[in-house]
Image (tube, rainbow, N blue to C red):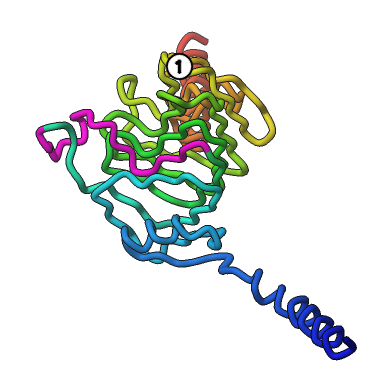
Amino acid sequence: MRKKLCLGITLFLMTIMLLPIMNVHAESYTVNNQDELKSALKNNDIDTIILGSDIETTEKINITRSVTIDGANHTIKYVGTFGAKGSKDNTVWGGIYVLQFYKTTGTLKDIKLTGANAGLLINGSNVTFVGTIDVSGNGFGGIELGQGSNVTEQNKLTLNNADIVNTTENDDHPTLWVPNDSDDAIMTVDGDVETIHAGDELTLVELNEIFDLGTPNTFDNIAYIEALFIISLMSILGATILNKKYN
């Protein structure tokens, strides 16, 4: 009886000692291609996926679990086809996004998403941006906050000391939009919470106006001051000449 008790205590102590080892998991993992990225997304032990280089993908990358993707200032570029006829033109709609967060939470950091119909689909998810998120070079726009079929979760986007970049936006290719058939989305920028309504299609300037961040300057402030100085000097000089002429 005593031997069994001692054996039981020994096994229990060994289990306690092994628990920290059993629970250790890879907090971060670096990927360098499409297959490595997909594999890392399937591994629930990986909390943070870091891009070790620019990556090309021939398919939309689906994210269905909570994870941080740190682009480390690298790019994920879609290089596949679009539509039923397999066009290489990303202005042919095929429902292709570089990344899709589906019914989950996640974080994107310092990354460029390009080459697809749109850079990012936030689909019934709560996503946080950190650093610079570049969605330039997509055929229809940058970021969609849409629900689609069988999704009831409200979309939420948070910018935490982050900037969105889109050098290819225009009125027909917005930086951020919510489809008409989706519920309103919630967007938070540095603690300021606003509702982005269904049907809204917003450029960066419009997003800045919503969050009262001001609009980008369209002129050089120093050059503007210099021009005012020259105009003032010329006005004074002209007035002096006229004064001498008529006196």
Please, which residue is most extreme toward the right here? 2
Along the line of sight, which residue is nearer the eye, 167 or 31?
31
- Residue 10 among those drawn in magenta: no
Q: Tell me the SS state at disc 1.
A: loop
Magenta segment range? 85-103
- Residue 102 among those drawn in magenta: yes
Q: Residue at x 84, y 82 (%)?
A: 9
Q: Quadrant of residue 142?
A: top left
Please, which residue is most extreme toward the front here? 1
Check the picture and name the quadrant holding the N terminus.
bottom right
Along the line of sight, which residue is nearer the eye, 70 or 94?
94
State whether residue 233 appears in this view. Answer: no
Vertical arrangement, residue 146 with respect to residue 183, above or below: below
Q: Which residue is mark 1?
A: 200
Q: Main secondary structure of the magenta part?
A: loop
Task: Estimate the x, y position of residue 220 in percent, counting from the top left.
Answer: 46, 35
Looking at the rendered structure, the number of numbered marks drawn on it comes to 1
- Which class describes the residues within 10 Å of circle 1: few (<14), some (14-19), or many (20+)? some
Q: Which amino acid type is shown beneath numbered disc 1?
A: Asp
State whether residue 144 appears in this view. Answer: yes
Vertical arrangement, residue 16 with respect to residue 186, above or below: below
On the picture, is 88 further left or further right than 185?
Answer: left
Please, which residue is most extreme toward the top here? 246
Q: Residue at x 26, y 33 (%)?
A: 139
Q: Residue at x 54, y 28 (%)?
A: 155
Task: Estimate the x, y position of residue 94 in percent, counting from the top left.
Answer: 23, 31
Task: Estimate the x, y position of residue 146 in percent, counting from the top left.
Answer: 44, 26
Q: Quadrant of residue 211?
A: top right
Please, which residue is most extreme toward the bottom here? 3
